[in-house]
Image (cartoon, rainbow, N blue to C red):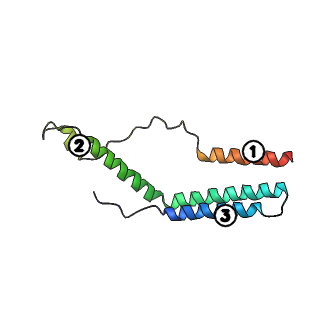
Amino acid sequence: MKRSLIRPKWWLLILSVTLVLGLFYKETTLPLSKAGHTWIEIGLVFLLYGLVMAWLNENETALISDELEEYKKMAVGNRRGNPHSGSNDVVDRKDNNRPEPVETDHEGRTWPVWVSSVMAIIVALFKIQDQ
């Protein structure tokens, strides 16, 4: 099987996370009030969220390509284990060695990631108001 030329740029994601973690470390050394520290931390969370979303949008095709390759390997491995009944098998002629579609039962049951991010920001805002 031919490897695809499209690969995600993981180094860019690692660099972004490292940059924001470095900014979090620098933020602890700043002489600010507790509210100031909290607002800077909220800003850094938004910055990290924006960087990760930009990276995901930029590498969406590469990530889908990787998933498709893994799925093809899995589907071909499952077929090799099943002996074929002969050349008159309708299923083999019909699908031309394409992987079978995956049915997901978990659709609609997972929370989007942004919900937890928004909840964390709301909690941080309430902490600021309590001070």
* 88 sits left or right of 120 in the view: left
Residue 125 located left or right of residue 66 = right
Mark in front: 3 vs 2 = 3
Q: Earlier in the sequence, mark 1 or mark 2?
A: 2
Q: Position of residue 86 (x, y in %)?
A: 13, 38
Residue 63 drawn above or below residue 100? below
- The residue that label 1 is drawn on is 123
Q: Is residue 11 above or below residue 66?
A: below
Q: Disc 2 residue type?
A: Arg
Q: Secondary structure at mark 2?
A: helix
Pointer 2: residues within 10 angstroms few (<14), some, or many (20+)? few
- Residue wearing tag 3: 22
**Residue 102 circle label:** none
Amino acid carrying mark 3 in the image: Gly
Q: Which mark is residue 80?
A: 2
Q: Are discs 3 and 2 less than 8 Å apart at CB? A: no
What residue lies at 80% left-to-right and 45% top-to-bottom?
126
The local secondary structure at tag 3 comes to helix
The image position of residue 118, as x and y in percent, is 68, 47
Where residue 111 appears, x then y in whole percent? 58, 40
* Cα–Cα gap, marks 3 and 2: 49 Å
Residue at 54%, 60% in the rendered image: 55
Is residue 5 rendered to the left or right of residue 12?
left
Q: What's the residue at 82%, 49% (across, down)? A: 128
Q: Cα distance, mark 1 to mark 2? A: 53 Å
The residue shown at (42%, 62%) is 7
Task: Residue type at mark 1: give it.
Answer: Val
Of tags 1 and 3, which is closer to the observer?
A: 3
